[in-house]
Image (cartoon, helix red, strand yellow):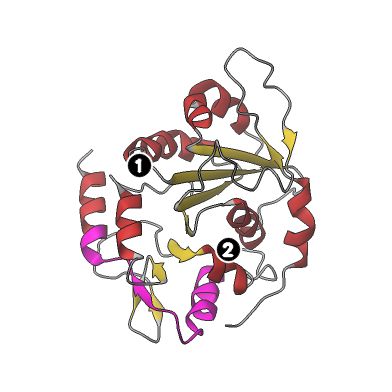
Amino acid sequence: MSYVKNKECDEAHSQLHKLNSAPLGSDRSQPIALSDKDSKSSPSTPTPKVSCFTTCMGRRHHLEQTLRRNLEWNKDYQNAEFVLLDYNSGDRLGDWIRDEIWEYIQSGLLVYYRYEESDFFKYSHSRNLAARLCRGEIICNLDADNFTGQDFLFYIEEQMETTDFLVGCEFDGKKFSPIERIEGDYGTTGRMAVRRQHFLEAGGYDESMVAWGYEDMDLFHRISLAGDLIVNPLTIDFWIALFTAMKSE
């Protein structure tokens, strides 16, 4: 497997802050520093099977539409974790989390971190940070404006029983390409589900690719180079069902 060394991500990991999961009414104003202990499971916090991760800088307006819905759609999956990385977002995202969806922090379904050391959004760096915060065996990235659909995590677990890497685009065994059989651009080409071990072994997204574009395809290709891994696209039936549901609401 082709490996990318991302020194910046290694150094930045220690500068993350985690929102306290204290009861409502207590002093929740100060974040707590992330330590190795925070990122590992404890007897009271079962290790999740599937972790979804989302990064956000200036996209609170999208999360206001998608996050609660995605959490509700997947709350029946007992081994779930949604990791939200506030990448120095200037729209008071943390306040909205506290005021509007705190119950999901309390339940452990949602975990919120804030990184304050970047003045502009770095696609690869932010995603690498968020992925490393995930505790699940399987990790899946979700953009802030993406809906999962009902019981998405059950679907992911079922699909990953027979594959190692799911991608939200077409894959013919050699080439990755956007889905062309569905009308409209739903921004799901970059969605992937992969075993966390394989993601880390590949070095994650290449942080030399700072701006948007093809950082996901680069990762797909590098992971697919490992000859013992099985790579498949998310099934077309799943996308059609999801997009039909979205259009009908």
Packing grade of label 1 (10 A; few <14, some 14-19, many >=20) is many
Q: Is residue 128 above or below residue 246?
A: below
**Nearer to me, 163 or 190:** 163
Tell me which residue sits at (58%, 19%) in the image. 23
The image shows residue 212 at horizontal and vertical percentages of 58, 63
Packing grade of label 2 (10 A; few <14, some 14-19, many >=20) is few
The image shows residue 41 at horizontal and vertical percentages of 59, 45
**Nearer to me, 227 or 5:** 227
Horizontal side, residue 114 vs residue 150: left or right:
right
Indicate the quadrant where residue 71 lies: top left
Return the residue found at the far front. Answer: 43
Q: Secondary structure at mark 2?
A: loop
Q: Is residue 213 magenta?
A: yes
Quarter of the image where the C terminus is located = top left
Q: Is residue 161 magenta?
A: no
Where is mark 2, residue-wise? Answer: 212
**Nearer to me, 214 or 18:** 18
Tell me which residue sits at (51%, 48%) in the image. 47
Task: Please state the extent of the stretch shown in magenta in the rendering.
Answer: 212-238
Quarter of the image where the N terminus is located = bottom right
**Nearer to me, 108 or 102:** 108
Amino acid identity at mark 1: Asn
Tag shown at residue 74: 1
